[in-house]
Image: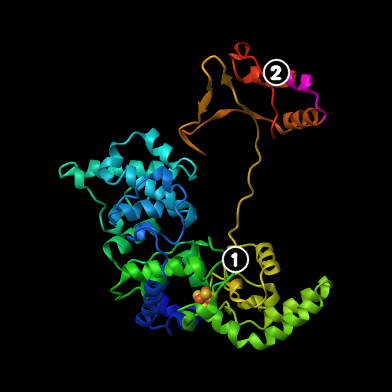
Amino acid sequence: MDMKQIKNLSKINIHIKHLNTINPTLFQKSVINWYKKNRRRLPWRGDTFPYTYPCNTLQEIGEIPDIKIDAYSIWVSEIMLQQTRVITVIDYYIKWMKKFPTIFILAQAKEEDVMKLWAGLGYYRRARYLHQGAKYLIQINNEKNNVNVMLPSSIKELKKIPGIGEYTAGAIASIAYNKPTPVIDGNIIRLFSRLFIYKASSNSTQLNKQLWSIGKILIKNCNENKEYNQGLIELGATICLPKKADCINCPINQFCLAYKNFNSNNNNIEKDINLLNFFEKKIHQKKSIKKKIIKSVKVCDHKNCDICVIDDDLDDDPINRKKTVNISKKILKKNQQVLPPNSVLIYTLKKNKKKPKKEYLISLILKNIKNDCYILNKRPNTGLLAKQWEFINIKITEEEYLIFDIEKKNDQTLNLKKYIEKIISKNITTTNRFNFNFNFKN
Ligand code: SF4
């Protein structure tokens, strides 16, 4: 969606109408001032030890290195922080920067060493991407001085590097090079959804597109892009949380439509919540009160908005709905059941997650007693945990698992031993050479 389309929407769309009431400069100032006073001390922000969180492997690390804050160190932190908590990343980040302080050194490293340092952090593809990215940068800078090679500053060039998408490119460009590029990650999706009362799944493509456009408008003419973007990230990570929002202490509450709605309905809500507690055990009555409370909330009227989900409890007129619903009503209902009614929390809906696939495996811990070493297997080059080492796992069917489970419960060790040998001989050709000692674990 471009600026022109956004302007057209502003005539009728409640979210964009609200955007037009916000002065970007005032908004930026509120975020930046708060960030400067309240930000956490972290190694990728140029802070020296101690940090806001402990460094648990300090003894193992030894001396904490001086980390130079540049596009490379920002890149490493952004990749490590994907799907991982700050508190977990700290130790890994310091170890990484100590061992691979530059792109050049990382590019020269063996893949095994890179993976070894990442072991335990999860999502191993990220480590491989960093390594491939470093090699790519060395390759494209062939003519120049490879030792000092650095990441480019343009979003287009950054996105050519393996593993760098829109968000990471925006983070590197703004934090390392102070470019006015927005960053929209999971935390900011939640924050903006509440600011502009979007009621949609956080993985909705349309919501994401619109939030990137809004992000571009809000960052316009900002001089301190680095602080502004980090401030938004920090707000999403510490104040505007998925299950708790500290709206009273939020520096942007004067711009937040969810908060305004909540405040304007607050007196009624208190009464309703008391009533709700009274009927706590009478589920059917509780539901009807909840419905009444939800009705009193000001939400998207669905006019010219094809992002928010239609809420049946709000009795919209179906004829006026011009919508593409990205999330099933079932999920919406599930969210309403767990969230407090009429709070700011209703403006982000959980992701529509895929059901996990069930797999049944027999894990063999095979020890060569003579050499006192274990036999490990390297996983395939692609897919889940690609190229990782593991004990030998044998995939079995659900039926086989059930037999296995019954035998184990009945402690039929002898039968079980025969049964496992049968499965193993089907999968490992050298079975005869092994002498099995059974020690069952779930
Ligand atoms: S006022 Fe509350 S809901 Fe709004 S952005 Fe701040 S913390 Fe989030």
Q: Is mark 1 within 8 Å of ligand 1?
A: no
Residue linked to disc 1: 349
When the figure is inspected, residue 374 is found, relative to residue 176, above or below; the finding is: above
Taking the magenta stretch, the answer to whether it contains residue 74 is no
Residue 305 vs residue 263, the one in the foreground: 263
Mark 1 neighbour class, 10 Å CA radius: few under 14, some 14 to 19, many 20 or more: many
Residue 117, image quadrant: top left
> Is the shortest distance between ligand 1 and the CB of mark 2 under 8 Å?
no
Snapshot quadrant of residue 269? bottom right
Q: Secondary structure at mark 1?
A: loop
Quarter the N terminus occupies: bottom left
Decide: is 315 above or below 309. below
Amino acid carrying label 2: it is Lys
What residue is pinned by disc 2? 422
Q: Is residue 224 visible?
A: yes
Which type of secondary structure does the marked residue at label 2 adopt? helix
- Indicate the position of residue 109 as horizontal and vertical percent values: 31, 36
**What kind of residue is marked 1?**
Leu
The stretch of residues the image draws in magenta is 410-417
Q: Residue 320's quadrant in the figure?
A: bottom right
Observer able to see residue 1:
no
Tell me what residue is drawn at x 72 percent, y 80 percent: 273
- Rounded to the nearest angstrom, the CA distance separating label 1 from label 2 is 48 Å
Q: Quadrant of the C terminus?
A: top right
Q: Which residue occupies 29% across, 40% down?
A: 107
Residue 342 pos. (x, y %):
65, 78
Main SS of the magenta part reads helix
